[in-house]
Amino acid sequence: MTKCADICAFECPPAPHDVAAIKANDEMIQLSGGSIPPLSGMRLLACGGNHTNSFLRGAKAGVRTEVTELQDASGKLDPMVIGASQLAFLTAVQDGMNWLIMDWRFIACVVLCASSLCPLCRCCSSISCMVGCLHPVSACRLDQEIPNLVHFVQSALNVRAGTQQTEIEVMLEMVRMVQDGADWNRVEKECSQLLSNCAQYSKIMAAFVRLQPAEIIRDIALFYKAHISNDGGPNRFMGSEWIGKAASLNFGKFEKFPLVMAAAWKANLSSKGTKLVDGYCRLVLPSHLSMLTSPANRKNVQHAEKVMTDARDVCKHMNINIADSTRIMGNLDCRLVLMLCKLSKTAGEQQYDSFDLIGQAAAWSLCVVC
C-alpha cells in the first residue's frame, strides 16, 4: 500500500467553473452503489492517487462491502482489518495523507497546451484572462515557454498508475483531446505514452474512437465503472487484436450500429472465469465480432439496435437515474449482443427466445425502479 502515503490535487475552481467537477463526482457516487460516500463540500480535485483516495473515503465512512474479508460485524468496511496487515493504510485513514496541492489556475495552463481557447470562458487564446498575476502567454507559445508541460505533469503525478491505464481511460482521453481541438496525429502520439509508448496500439484505438460518437465511448466507460471497476477486481483489457477487429467492421456504406458496437464491448468486459485470462477478456472473440456484419445476421442486428435505442428513449422519458439506467441498459445490451453472437449459453445467461423478450425484461426492470 505504498500509494497510501502521498496524493496530488488541484484546488477546486470557484463557481461557476466547478460545475463539471461536481457533476462528475455525483455520477461516480451514484454508480458506486454505495461504495463511495457523498461529500458535504468539494475543496480539492485529486489527480494522482484519486482511486486510493476514494477507497479511503469509503473506509473512513464505513460503507458496506461485499468482500467478507474486509467486513466488520455489520458488513461494512473495517479499517482495522485492512490495517492489521497494511499499516500504511490504517495511518492514511486515521491521519490522512501528504497532499501536494496546486493552484486551480494551473489547470488552465495544462489544458491550453491542447487548445487555443480559454478552457473556462472559451473566449481567447490568452491565459491572462484567468491568471491575472501572469504575463499574457498565448496558447500557441505555451509549449515553447514550458516545453513538454503535459508530459511532465502526466509522468510526475502518478507514475505507478501510469503503467496501468485501461484502454477505456485512454479512449476517454482521446475524446477529451479531440473536443479540446487537438488533431488526431497529436492524439495518437500523446496517448501512446499511456499505453507503454506503443504507437501502433494507440493508432488502433484511435481508429476505433474516430468511428464512434463521443457518447458511445462514455457509455462504455460508465458501464465499466458501474459493473466492473466497482467490483474491486483487476483492470480488464480487450487487446489490440480485438480493438483492431472492432475498428475494421463494415456494416455497409450507409449503415452504422453504434449501440451494438458498445454492447459488444460491454459483453466482453463482463468476461469471467475461464473467459478472463490475465485481465484480458475472452468471452466475445474477434471471430464473434465478424458475425455482427454477416448478411444473414443483418436483420437481427438492426432489430437489436432498435431495441437498445427504444429502451434508452424510455429511460429518458421516465427520468431514470444514471446508476439504474446504466445497470439496466448494460444488462439489456449484453444479452442482446450475446444472442447475436450465439454466446448466451456460454456466458451462463438466462435463455431468451427473442430480442423482444429481452427488451420486455429490461422494461420490467425499469418499472421496478420507478
Image (cartoon, grey):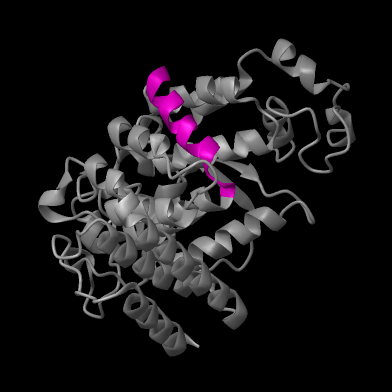
* Relative side of 342 to 58, left or right: left
Q: Residue at x 45, y 41 (%)?
A: 169
Percent x, y of residue 322: 52, 69
Point out the image quarter for the N terminus: top left
Seen from the viewer's position, the closer of residues 149 and 165 is: 165
Name which quarter of the figure residue 124 lies in. Answer: top right
Q: Residue at x 75, y 18 (%)?
A: 142
Total count of labels: 0
Q: Residue at x 67, y 38 (%)?
A: 179
Tell which residue pokes out farthest to the left in this image: 274
Name which quarter of the figure residue 159 lies in. Answer: top left
* Relative side of 266 to 9, left or right: left
Asked whether 207 falls inside the magenta stretch, the response is: yes
Residue 36 seen in the figure? no
Name which quarter of the figure residue 40 lies in. Answer: bottom right
Q: Residue at x 67, y 54 (%)?
A: 20
Percent x, y of residue 319: 60, 79
Seen from the viewer's position, the closer of residues 343 and 139 is: 343
Residue 10 sits above or below residue 207 on the image:
below
Percent x, y of residue 252: 47, 43
Residue 313 seen in the figure? yes
Which range of residues does the magenta coloring cover? 197-214
Percent x, y of residue 113: 69, 24
Seen from the viewer's position, the closer of residues 117 and 98 is: 117
Tell which residue pokes out farthest to the front in this image: 296
Asked whether 241 falls inside the magenta stretch, the response is: no
Does the magenta stretch mainly form a helix, a strand or a loop? Answer: helix
